[in-house]
Amino acid sequence: MRQALRLLGYGWALHFKILSRSAFDGFLGVLWPLFFATIAFFMFRTGGNSSALLYTSLGASVMGVWSSTSVAASSALQRERWAGMLELLAAAPVHFSLILMPITLAMSTVGIYSMTATLLWGRLLFGIQLHVQHLLLFALAIPVAILSIGMLGFLLSVTVVRYRTAWALGNALEYPVWLVCGFLVPLSLFPGWVRPISWALAPTWGIRAIREAALGGSPLPDLLVCAAIGLGYAAAGMLLVDTVLRSARSRATLSLT
Amino acid sequence: MSYGLRVFFVGGLMSYRALFNWLSPWILIPSFLVAPLFQILLFTYVGRAAGLESDRFYVIGNAIQYAAIPCLFAMGNTIGGERWQQTLPLILGTPAPRIPLFLGRALPVVGNGFVVAAVALVVGSAILGVRVPLGAVAPIALATAVSALSCTGLGLVNAALGLRVREVAVLSNVIFGVLLVFCGVNVAVGDLPGWMQPISNALPLTHGIEAARRLADGVAFGGVTGLLGTELAIGAAYMALGYGLLRFFETMSRRHATLERA
Amino acid sequence: MAVVEAVDLRRTYKTSTGLFRRRSLEVEAVRGVSFEIAEGELFGLLGPNGAGKTTTIKMLITLLIPTSGEARVLGYDVVKDAREVRKRIGYVFGGDRGLYERLPGIDNLRYFAELYGVPPREQRARIDELLELVGLKGREKEKVEGYSKGMRQRLHIARGLLHDPPVLFLDEPTIGVDPVGARELRGTIASLAQAGKTVLLTTHYMFEADALCDRIAVIAKGEIVAEGTPRDLKALVTEGTVVEIETFDAPGDAADRLRRLPGVMSVAVEDREQAQVLVVQSEATGTTTQQLLVALGDVQVGRVSAREPTLEDAYVSLVTRK
């Protein structure tokens, strides 16, 4: 058990280091959500709805966390295969999820750069002041949201591994999650049948927790639901990993040759 | 003359198929059908929350803006792809006339952009219950086509620059974001800060989107010809700029062997 | 007890062609391979590209599930007890890939040390020791993207040894490495075997197998065509002769005519510019050069030379036999 935790921690740190060293990923990862956040801010400001700005800004800051996870996670295994790493990792005597989880968790953690940038951007260009009601819970909600998104990425990476063009699927999931999890708008605007979908997704709860911690409310239940769903993703992913790997060993798809 | 035409049509289409390797349904459907629809939905809901414009405003704006994805990426692929496969020096070594050679590659891209925007418009309108006067359908299609054409011009510039830049995808994504913010896609140009407006007017899509919106509002075709003309002119300017850059790089590469380097 | 046992291993690949009308083809890459490796042996699997060496080794290291047959490493079944097998083996392959480029060599090693459960307290000492062994001391803090091919190979070997496995699988470890670097690598491999490790080495360099291995199995088209010590393999051929006959415009069946002669083991045809050379291997008490020339009849013949067979001839004849 201790070794498993060590491995998770070490792997996460290692991949975070690798990702942080890529200027391309970093620059675009920070800039991309800023375009969307900017437009949203403009829309609310022009509409004269300034009180919505902080609400939006908090959700918008998490957009980058999902962006940096969705495409990268869906193509994670494909990339490892191209790098010749997949077979090496599969040959190691540990459960493969202990290797893959840190990869997607690192991807979502890198989103912290974009989170900071978006909040700063909102502050500097639109005068959106960040007031936080429950500081401790706010500080807790952020990592919980980030990690649960990382777990969603983990599940995604295992689910789509059969598709060579999985990156396109991950790419296509960027907007839907932004929409349905209420990153920019309250869920009350959506037709009723959308709610269950939103509620099944961890980011919805993570953002609610962040908002309630900042704007006032009860973030703790949201936080717990977010964490629980995140753990659910982890469990589902771990079960799938065994099936996927066995299939890969049978169909000889662990390597390119 | 027919040599030039063949280079234009046949060569253009073949290189499109060869290099634009997004042509699998597993990529096309998520990237060209699903994504633009969700962009429309996303901003329509933000618009509803902000209480600014009608749903139709956002459907038209986002559908047409999304043409930028094929216009930028497909163009970048067909030109940049030559460099990766190292067929570029071979092609430049032929006596094929340059204008049809480079512009031939642009034609399928324009088609691609048009189709993506048109489908997004139709499906988005259907989902959100947005209506458009029947007589305006054809003119709006025209406005969409003109916008796709002019955006392809920008795509050509992007592709040319992409030959010299290491990370082409970053550039394309940044341009997409700029278009999203500046072209009056979700915020009317008039509502943007003053310093942004000249930039908006110098970019493709701005006038085309405006024209399509007016047509949807019931303005007669005659009332938007000015806008469409401007859009065409902007597109032509970018095409010319892109073409010029490609020729420039071709000359540079003959002197310094730069285009072969991956 | 044999350390590595392969019993009638088979592996078939299904590939599909075409976009709309998918047709699947079955390729039998490994067709009934069996061998045993004793403790401390350096065993070579020698064969040309596409012979099935890599497929075989991947089945043994649990990365591929055999279509049929069994394999055991240290008594553990490679399919049922995969995890137990993985704990006890090291796997090194040739080529550029398999390392995190943006990280320094030492970080790559630390990661795999974690993966293989090397106790944290021992990691540092072990890594140091291995860097010394493979000659990368002093370069470990540089990013892998700057390493030469030989350095990457050495890092791979270090990685394979981190958890001090009793069994090592090396898949074409010197491929693409310059001669000097390759020689050093071979020295390292030899010393590993001398230290008591059991090593399975695949290669298509016959001289490498000859120099390093205690025993060699020659594999071609998915089957083992010969097995024995290097000396045994050479003995397959030293009692014969090789006659090289230069011919001009020989008809297609010329080689076949020679093959039908008693005592002729194989005839290989080499195309030169203006001529062809028929390389005829025959047993010692087989046909004489005179008889070969008579069998060729009125085919125009140029230079004829006879010589002793080399291990390379043995290898070529083994792998090109029908």
Image: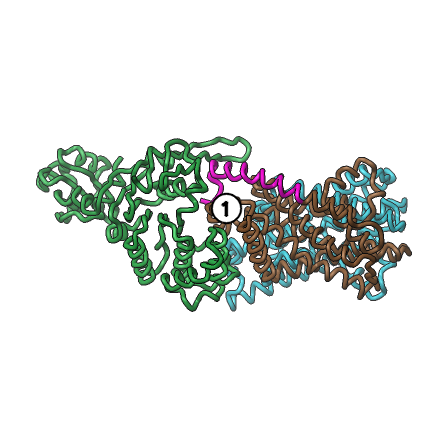
Check disc 1 and report the residue beneath it: A94
Regarding mark 1 in the picture, which secondary structure is present there?
A: loop
Residue B36 image point, x, y percent: 73, 45
Toward which corner of the image does residue C235 lie, by quadrant?
top left
- Name the chain under label 1: A
Chain C shade in the render: green
Residue A36 image point, x, y percent: 76, 55
**Residue B30 vs residue C55, the one in the foreground:** C55
Magenta: main secondary structure equals helix
Chain B shade in the render: cyan
- Chain drawn brown in the picture: A
Q: Can residue B246 be seen in this view?
A: no
Membership of A238 in magenta stretch:
yes
Write the residue at 67% across / 51% down: A147
Residue range (magenta): A231-257
Q: Is residue B212 above or below residue B202?
A: above
Q: Horizontally, is C236 left or right of A224 in the view?
A: left
**Residue B113 vs residue C195, the one in the foreground:** C195
Residue A215 image point, x, y percent: 84, 55
Q: Horizontally, is C5 left or right of B230 in the view?
A: left
Q: Is residue C63 above or below residue B210?
A: above
